[in-house]
Image (cartoon, rainbow, N blue to C red):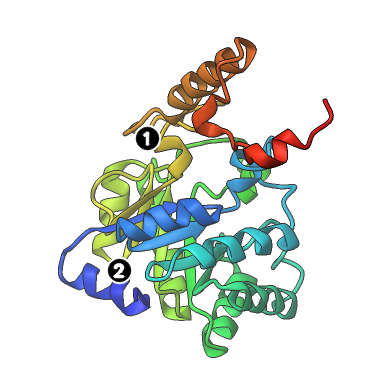
């Protein structure tokens, strides 16, 4: 069973941490069989699983449904629930209550974006209450409207130092790790080397302590758009389309179901039928 200690041990031993997203039972089972270190039930499911245009619309109640499904499928991987937009921003009490709901639903930890005074206080309260927290800096999707879109972060020395300062504050508050999103590899390397806790990159280059991407992106299932930092290891979309077209063709031609996929009525009962 993977725990927060697993992440720190891998970091201390200079072993890379492999994480992926999952939103459903069967995907979680596959990732668990592959012995993935951590599974993030990310708010990206708003777009990938529910078809929203961004992550703003998904609610805590929706997130809990998917966390429960993933927890049923993954028995060994460390499950992290992504706290959705405005589910932790109103007060520490609100954030702590919703984080607790995620843990009760089956998550082992929660992820929070940003590093203002409120976030730091919430991290401390969560950790004090037995809820591990993964931080998230760099490009933070829930702040996309104030950032001004999908912009690479950490492109200047001053900005890198600001992100490092925030990282150290999150580390001190109790985060067991920090996601670094959309930044030059050298920037993430500098931050990683100056932290005790592990960093998890997503579009942050190879020098982070580990990596996380959306599973549906790397297996070619989600095709609305493909980020630059994604490498496709499979093409599920085309494979499924091929199968569906073959099924449709056989149904239209009366080839499916065949006798092999059908059940036969007992001859004696068949003889009793009037027609």
Residue at horizontal 45%, vertical 22%?
238
Q: Position of residue 191 (x, y in %)?
A: 31, 58
Q: CA distance from mark 2 to mark 1?
A: 24 Å
Mark 1: which secondary structure?
loop
In the rendered image, which quarter contains the C terminus? top right
Q: Is residue 165 visible?
A: no
Q: Which residue is mark 1?
A: 229
For the residues bearing labels 2 and 1, Cβ distance under 8 angstroms:
no
From this viewpoint, which residue is outermost toward the bottom? 128
Residue placed most toward the observer, 56 or 272: 272
Mark 2: which secondary structure?
loop
In the rendered image, which quarter contains the N terminus? bottom left
Sort mark 1 into few (<14), some (14-19) or many (20+) by Cα contacts within 10 Å: few
Q: Position of residue 168 (x, y in %)?
A: 40, 70
Q: Which residue is mark 2?
A: 195
The image shows residue 63, relative to residue 169, as above or below, that is: above
Earlier-in-chain disc, 2 versus 1:
2
Residue placed most toward the observer, 199 or 74: 74
Across the whole image, how many numbered discs are drawn on residues? 2
Residue placed most toward the observer, 243 or 123: 243
From this viewpoint, which residue is outermost toward the right? 274
The image shows residue 158, relative to residue 203, as above or below, that is: below
Q: Position of residue 48 (x, y in %)?
A: 59, 39
Q: Position of residue 246 (x, y in %)?
A: 51, 17
Residue at horizontal 53%, vertical 27%?
259
Residue at horizontal 37%, vertical 60%?
32
The image shows residue 154, relative to residue 8, as above or below, that is: above
Q: Is residue 251 visible?
A: yes
Q: From the viewer's perspective, is 176 left or right of 63?
A: left
């Amino acid at each position: 069973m993977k725990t927060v200690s697993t992440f720190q041990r891998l970091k201390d031993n200079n072993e890379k941490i492999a994480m992926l997203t999952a939103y459903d039972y069967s995907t979680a089972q596959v990732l668990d069989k592959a012995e993935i270190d951590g599974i993030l039930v990310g708010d990206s499911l708003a777009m990938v699983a529910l078809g929203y245009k961004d992550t703003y619309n998904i609610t805590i109640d929706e997130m809990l449904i998917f966390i429960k499904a993933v927890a049923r499928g993954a028995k060994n991987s460390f499950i992290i629930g992504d706290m959705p937009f405005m589910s932790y921003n109103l007060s520490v009490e609100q954030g702590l209550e919703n984080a607790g709901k995620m843990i009760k639903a089956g998550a082992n930890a929660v992820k929070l974006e940003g590093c203002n005074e409120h976030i730091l206080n919430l991290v401390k309260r969560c950790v004090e209450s037995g809820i591990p927290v993964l931080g998230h800096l760099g490009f933070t999707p829930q702040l996309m409207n104030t950032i001004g879109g999908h912009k690479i972060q950490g492109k200047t020395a001053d900005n890198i130092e600001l992100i490092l300062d925030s990282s150290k504050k999150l580390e001190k508050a109790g985060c067991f790790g920090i996601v670094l999103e959309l930044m030059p590899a050298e920037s993430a390397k500098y931050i990683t080397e100056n932290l005790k806790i592990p960093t998890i990159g997503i579009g942050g280059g190879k020098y982070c302590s580990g990596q996380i991407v959306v599973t549906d992106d790397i297996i070619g299932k989600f095709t609305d758009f493909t980020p630059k930092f994604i490498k496709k290891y499979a093409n599920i979309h085309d494979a499924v389309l091929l199968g569906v077209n073959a099924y449709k063709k056989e149904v239209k031609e009366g080839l499916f179901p065949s006798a092999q996929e059908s059940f036969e009525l007992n001859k004696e009962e068949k003889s009793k039928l009037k027609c």
